[in-house]
Amino acid sequence: MSQEKRSTTIRDVAKTAGVSVSTVSRVLNGKIDVAKETKTHVLEVIEDLGYSTNLAARSMRSQKKNLIGLIMPDIAYPYAIEIMKGVNQAIAESEFDLLVYTSGDVRKRGHVTSEQKYITLLAKSISDGVIVVAPVASEYNIDKPIVSIDPVMSHPNYPAVHATNYQGSLDAMEYLIGLGHKRIGFIGGRVELESANRRLSGYRDALKKTGLPVDEQLIVSGDYTTKTGIEGGQKLLTLEDRPTAIFASNDQMAMGVYQIAEKMGLSIPNDFSLVGFDNIPESKYLGLTTIDQFILRMGYTATQMLIKIINEIPLEDQTFRMKTQLVVRNSCRRYSEVH
Amino acid sequence: MSQEKRSTTIRDVAKTAGVSVSTVSRVLNGKIDVAKETKTHVLEVIEDLGYSTNLAARSMRSQKKNLIGLIMPDIAYPYAIEIMKGVNQAIAESEFDLLVYTSGDVRKRGHVTSEQKYITLLAKSISDGVIVVAPVASEYNIDKPIVSIDPVMSHPNYPAVHATNYQGSLDAMEYLIGLGHKRIGFIGGRVELESANRRLSGYRDALKKTGLPVDEQLIVSGDYTTKTGIEGGQKLLTLEDRPTAIFASNDQMAMGVYQIAEKMGLSIPNDFSLVGFDNIPESKYLGLTTIDQFILRMGYTATQMLIKIINEIPLEDQTFRMKTQLVVRNSCRRYSEVH
DNA sequence: CATAATATCAGTAACGTTACCGGTAATGAT
DNA sequence: ATCATTACCGGTAACGTTACTGATATTATG
């Protein structure tokens, strides 16, 4: 290792202060039975030596950590950032601190295995509870509280928060259909996530409900990234009988559609209409009509739920459903046959 | 505590696998001297029991953690997010994982003390090294590598990355002056940070250099938040002899100026010109002319430096100076006396 | 066949902290 | 003055892991 010097421990403090290790520990933890004088003296020594307690050792021994863990596959995209903001907000109002854990990239390791590994790592070791974003597993081998955000499968026994994906999708479609669109393309999300499937169902059902045909050609797959938005958009827009509108199942992919549209010299909403899902901050600037799922608030709510569980306050509901809402901006326009 | 059940330990694994604890440990750490059969058997048991190693205990005993800590006062503003993206990127390319530590809000605790506390907490306990953003202290009582981003004081012996704040400020001012502006307002940043002072110096010196007077009325203070941008902007724009341009020492405050301008019915750049500093993503949408300090890249570089230090690869330079660059958009226009 | 080398494992001692128990001195009650 | 109570503190045993040492069987060597 680079440094040889061992850092100062509680034992060093005890020795120079002339007291026992347990006394220092009691001072550190604000226990009552320690004389005022010794307390201030020990505190002085601590200051002098620049001592600070070793988290790992403390966690190992004691129970309460006042720390909440947030596990995300990646933190560098708008959805994740919004979640973090919400979590951060709830944390700021609480007695807890926050530890965000990320491997930087999903592709760096295996999937389910690593997820479980990280969770147990964080949870068992140093935190009082964990929030997991878009988890693939639905059960965890853990004796600590866990709250999931947008889980793969909603499981009535495990606390989770997710948006009303189906209803939101329905709303988006009804808006488009109301505008006169009949050929509407769909770009799907990560198939392993329930949210993606619910949105697809909404797309299909809205079509059926209004007696419109479901053209499988118009349904392309993606994985919620800009890249697949570009690819999906291209596939759709180069179709012989090009759709007059595209419903991208998240805003990130919608941004990809913007890019490919520009590249193809197509204008939104003049050449085709576009609606997204999520309402990430960028969408506002882009003027993208989308379904708001209040991501920030989802993070906020999940954190509050977790804190309640940690403090053993019973939850009214195990799963919180965030009501989505259509946000109309200017990426869509009325379509009439005659053109 | 809420759960009574102790989680499975290495001892449980050892017992059910019929081997010793040390053998399990060796399997876990991929040591060579363990028979293939026993290895697979132990692995099976681990899988069955859903065992996962306790980070705290491991950290306490062994040295390498493959974990980098990032300490931020708050994570919910664009600057912080850009840093995180950069760090995240470097992390993704490395063998390390990332642990972001935040108290959610600076105001939650004292300042210098808590900073040191967090750093030691993270560093001594579970990480191989730490990146600190906008740290107030310049020396740490730590035997682990630390890299600072935008530190209070640049200290030649402590690795840090910061932008060429002075030069950037000079560039912004010269641009404004070149446009014919003579009365230029300035909104300052957090005074305890060196970056803020360097930007102010740049403002003053640019004025002096071109023989323009420095009107102290035109210099108002802020703390890098939108709120103080609004306040500072209001102060400046309600002056009798209103400035024809404002230089906000970061984009966040410039956004505040946009807000107050709209409220006052003033148009940018028609009624006054505005330039910011940072080039956060929002500025692009706002059309704000600003000084890019490549925040993301600063995070990226800091992380790379830290990894080098951890791996004992010598640094060419202890401090990395990121070259700033003027980004002209449409928040400024030429000013002529006659109007 | 004897000896040396190797492969495989078990046992023990830490790591730095807190929980728990018990001991001493000082104070109060009778 | 004696006993009970209280205030304060020290010692010891964990927590779950890995490093280290050394023991035992197995194989190779001559």
Image (spheres, coloured by chain):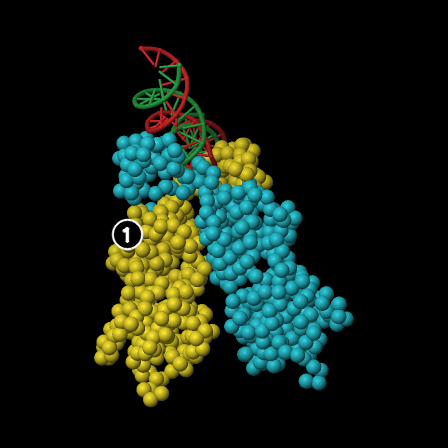
Chain colours: A cyan, B yellow, C green, D red
Which residue occupies the foreground of this view, B237 or A145? B237
Q: Residue at x 72, y 69 (%)?
A: A207
Quarter containing the C terminus of chain A? bottom right
**Where's residue A116, x and y in %?**
55, 48
Q: Residue A93: x percent and y percent?
A: 47, 52
Near-viewer residue (D20 or B72): B72
* Amino acid on which disc 1 is placed: Glu
User: Can residue A240 be spotted in the picture?
Assistant: no
Disc 1: host chain = B
Give residue B239's position: percent from left, percent from top.
34, 75
Q: Residue at x 58, y 45 (%)?
A: A140
Quarter of the rendering containing residue B305: bottom left
Residue extending furthest right? A211
Give the x, y percent position of residue C2.
Answer: 41, 25
Task: Give whichever of B271, D30 is nearer the camera.
Answer: B271
Q: Residues within 10 Å of mark 1 (few under 14, many from 20)?
A: few
Give the labeled residue for mark 1.
B139
Above or below, comparing residue A241 to residue A10 in the picture: below
